Image (spheres, grey):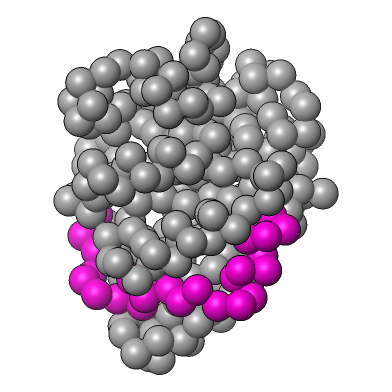
Amino acid sequence: MINILSIGEILWDIFPDKKILGGAPANFVFHARQFGSDATLFTALGNDQQGIELEENAVKAGIIMQSSRVSHPTGIADIFLNNEQVPTYKLNDNCAWDHIPLTNKLKKFAEKADLIVFGTIAQRNIESRNTIQEALKLSKSSSKILFDINLRLDFYSKEIIEESLNAANYLKLNDEEESVLQNLFNKNIKQIISDFNLELAILTLGPKGSKIITSNSMSECPAAKCKIVDTVGAGDSFTAFFIINYLKGMSIHESQKKASKVAAYVCAHNGATVQIPKNLKS
């Protein structure tokens, strides 16, 4: 069983008519556990009603979480869907997951994890950024590190991205984030992979499918067809299913095809924490 540590935000995704548990690191843990991994999220919640409800909902969803309670409000993201049901986000400032502490328990998890997953959003504040970067330094030599870049608004800098890429083995990004990186470094994605010695990049392209890119190859896969309800969490499900199968020895293209079907199933349902049927897990 693959031991996974995910560090970062968990929050309420606030839609016009409902609120749903969200946050890419939390979504990754949810899906990774569905696919048979021992995945744990390290995060922080506020001492407020939103935090109590969020923890209760995480437990119900099957997300295993180590959450420190801090004196900042629980994270919230207001979500707006366009005509294609693609979301944009507005996040509250200086919230709980901006202040994730480097606890002894987190250090122990970092030392034994087979895969560590992190992104940029939780690094917008120096406290959580230091926690994430210190945890990465504690990883064992055989572990792999996945940087799910997950750019939101202006919650990143070239310095944060460079430091994160230097620590990573795998990069996850979408087509918009690819453009940002290429403009930031004035290089194409293959050059970035080579410069930062990445094993591969997972590039999701929405309705255009996906690409898995290495320094000397590229695997393309069309998106599996579905009736889109919303796309929230689809990339997280794709990434979790792809990387777990890849780490277990499945070929890049086969892992990619299976992950595409899972992401389509998530797109056909509301929210990110969608239960995947057994036939799509095998």
Residue 45: % across, % down: 43, 80
* Residue 97, magenta (yes or no): yes
Residue 42: % across, % down: 54, 68
Name the residue rendered at 24%, 64% in the picture. 91
Name the residue rendered at 26%, 18% in the picture. 187
* Residue 236, magenta (yes or no): no
> As displayed, is residue 261 above or below residue 65?
above
Please say whether residue 150 is visible from this viewpoint: no
> As displayed, is residue 48 above or below residue 205?
below
Quadrant of res 138: bottom right
Query: On the picture, is 205 further left or further right than 138?
Result: left
Quadrant of res 84: top left
| Label total for image | 0
Q: Residue furthest right?
A: 1
The one nearer the camera, 150 or 113, is 113
Please say whether residue 79 is visible from this viewpoint: yes
The one nearer the camera, 48 or 130, is 130
Name the residue rendered at 24%, 75% in the picture. 94
Which corner quadrant holds the C terminus?
Answer: top right
Query: On the picture, is 94 further left or further right than 50?
Result: left
The one nearer the camera, 70 or 14, is 70
Residue 126: % across, % down: 30, 67
Question: Start and end of the magenta stretch?
Answer: 89-113
Residue 33: % across, % down: 70, 54
Name the residue rendered at 17%, 51% in the picture. 154
> As displayed, is residue 261 above or below residue 11?
above
Quadrant of res 106: bottom right
